Amino acid sequence: MNKILNTVIMLGVLACTANAANEPQKQPAPGSPAPDFSLVTGDGSQVSLKDNRGKWIVLYFYPKDFTGGCTLEAKNFQRDLAKYEQAGAVILGVSVDSAQSHKDFCAKEGLAFKLLADPDAKVSALYGSTMEYQGAKMASRNTFIIKPKGEIAKVFTGVKPADHSDDVLKALAELKKG
């Protein structure tokens, strides 16, 4: 029984922490324009990248709502939300889950930032952030810091959920210094 349980736990961890053994994808490079998009949130509203011009944006892609690594990552962003707001930054999370799943996930975990539904993975693909897992297309765990004028400032790939918010805050502070 323990062997089966350990296997199930490992599969869950892999689903939410690995970028899988897929071919490398081309992410937009620092200095390039951030690809624009418009996606639906859990509350049914549309969010576009251009709606947040003038602010720093932390655009993070993650595999799946309600999984261990993804929950940890989201809760750490929530824990640090006031620090992001003080830095003039907006957090936007993207996965291939539905808007309803995002609504339920935000309610369960007390998340006050926007999660965006990308069910066809088109935006995830624009950002070079897709992977296949057990035959399903998912967003891979990558984060983009976007400057107020809409330009990519920094790219994080294959991030570790536990320390990621701290790493992003440090990078954001360095970027804002100039």
Image (cartoon, grey):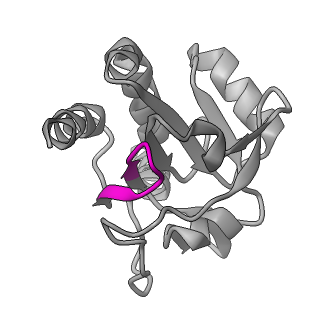
Q: Is residue 23 visible?
A: yes
Q: Tell which residue pokes out farthest to the right in this image.
A: 44
Task: Please state, as top left, top right, bottom left or bottom right, where the C terminus lies in the image.
Answer: top left
Vertical side of 112 occupied by 44: above or below = below
> Number of numbered discs present?
0
Q: Nearer the viewer, residue 19 or 67?
A: 19
Compared across the picture, whether 52 is left or right of 76 comes to right
Q: Is residue 71 visible?
A: no
Name which quarter of the figure residue 102 lies in. top right
Residue 152 counted in the magenta span: yes
Expressed as whole percent of the image width and height from the top left, the position of residue 42 reads 77, 31
Q: Nearer the viewer, residue 79 or 134?
A: 79
Expressed as whole percent of the image width and height from the top left, the position of residue 174 reads 14, 39
Compared across the picture, whether 56 is left or right of 112 comes to left
Vertical side of 160 occupied by 130: above or below = below
Vertical side of 141 occupied by 92: above or below = above
Expressed as whole percent of the image width and height from the top left, the position of residue 110 reads 58, 13
Compared across the picture, whether 102 is left or right of 28 comes to right
Expressed as whole percent of the image width and height from the top left, the position of residue 161 reads 33, 41
Q: Tell me the residue at 48%/33% (across/down).
A: 91
Residue 83 counted in the magenta span: no
Q: Tell which residue pokes out farthest to the bottom in this image.
A: 23
Q: Tell me the residue at 63%/60% (across/down).
A: 36
Name which quarter of the figure residue 168 lies in. top left
Vertical side of 23 occupied by 84: above or below = above
Q: Which residues are magenta?
A: 144-154
Compared across the picture, whether 99 is left or right of 23 comes to right
Q: Tell me the residue at 75%/49% (across/down).
A: 39
